[in-house]
Image: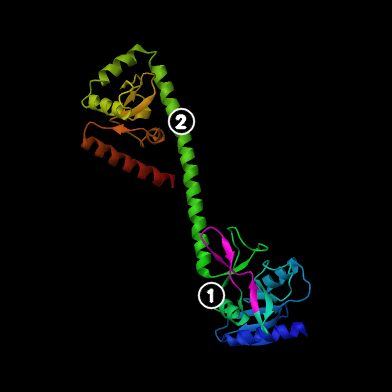
Amino acid sequence: MAHHLLKLELAQAARGAGWLAELEVSGPDGRWRADVLASTASGRRFALEAQLASITIDEIRARTERMSTYGVRACWFSDRSRIPWLGAVPSVRLARQDDGLIAVEPMARFVGTHWTPEPSIPLAQFMSRILTWRLASHAPRRPQRHVARPVTRLWAHPKCVVAEAKKLRDEEKRLRMVQEEQERAEWRGYARQEAALAERTARTDPDRGALARHSARLPGIDQAIAQVAARYLGRIRVTVGWSVGDSRYASGVPLVNERGALLAIFDPLPQAGPCPAFLTDVDLPLLFPTKERRERFEQYRAVRERTRAKYEG
């Protein structure tokens, strides 16, 4: 009797929302059977299942999926206080209040970082909302707070579903940025270690010293050295590195401190092939004698990067 009464109340709520509602409707091949089948003239169908007897989660999921393969959405209703399968499928716990039924759980809204319960609403209002997509069955990915028992699926306004998706995208983007920055930091460390090793090796060759002294007379290099020294408030001595001519500097001149650590690169300009990745990995200032030289380098690098991206893509 309780099961039959609940089916009648579900059918009445669906009819109140403007849908046709029939009891005990089976699929054409008998593979599924709905306690109440709500439908529209346009062909939309929604099974309203009154489930008061015990049923396993696997079984209720299988029945839900079977109806879904036939284009029939389903929602399971129960007025029992303890419902093991609540939230495992689109479902709602009902309670009697003032001779009427109210939908109690699991309905929630997304409040920026987590899901929090929505207040109970009359069955007729709940039915109208799920039939018109103003409440959607959703599998939350953010925490559920202030709930007696978190569920796998809850009912939420589509705007809340979109808000959660945006929050997740923002978090994933932030995590990617953190990870990428960590990777860049590692590459910076490796690149600067390479530069330091190249400088130490070069300082064992007197001919490289002569080349460094020649490079120290290039137009504009004194201003570049002064600019780098100013970045360190004049506390270090900046000179031309002996590793000048290294292909990683793209024909530029390395500027180093007393220990040979690379501080900046003066007037790089790749003459062939793509711009060396080292210039990006090392993440140090690139200085130029004139604005035109800088613009020429940036144009050259942009063309080479587009060409490389095209072939790599």
Give percent across and percent down for residue 237: 32, 20
Q: Does residue 258 appear to the left or right of 67 in the view shown?
A: left
Work out whether 303 lies above or below 97: above
Label 1 sits on what residue type? Arg
| Kind of element beneath mark 1 | loop
Q: Does residue 137 appear to the left or right of 295 in the view shown?
A: right
Q: Residue at x 63, y 66 (%)?
A: 153
Residue 289 in sight in this render: yes
- On whether residue 104 falls in the magenta region, the answer is yes
Residue under label 2, please give it: 189
Foreground: 64 or 76?
A: 76
Q: Quadrant of residue 154?
A: bottom right
Residue 271 in sight in this render: no
Work out whether 276 lies above or below 46: above
Task: Identify the disc placed on residue 192.
Answer: none
Mark toward the viewer: 1 or 2: 1
Which residues are the magenta region? 102-119
Residue under label 1, please give it: 134
| Mark 2 neighbour density, 10 Å: few (under 14) some (14–19) many (20 or more) | some
| Kind of element beneath mark 2 | helix
Give percent across and percent down for residue 9: 67, 85
Determine the CA span between mark 1 and mark 2. 53 Å
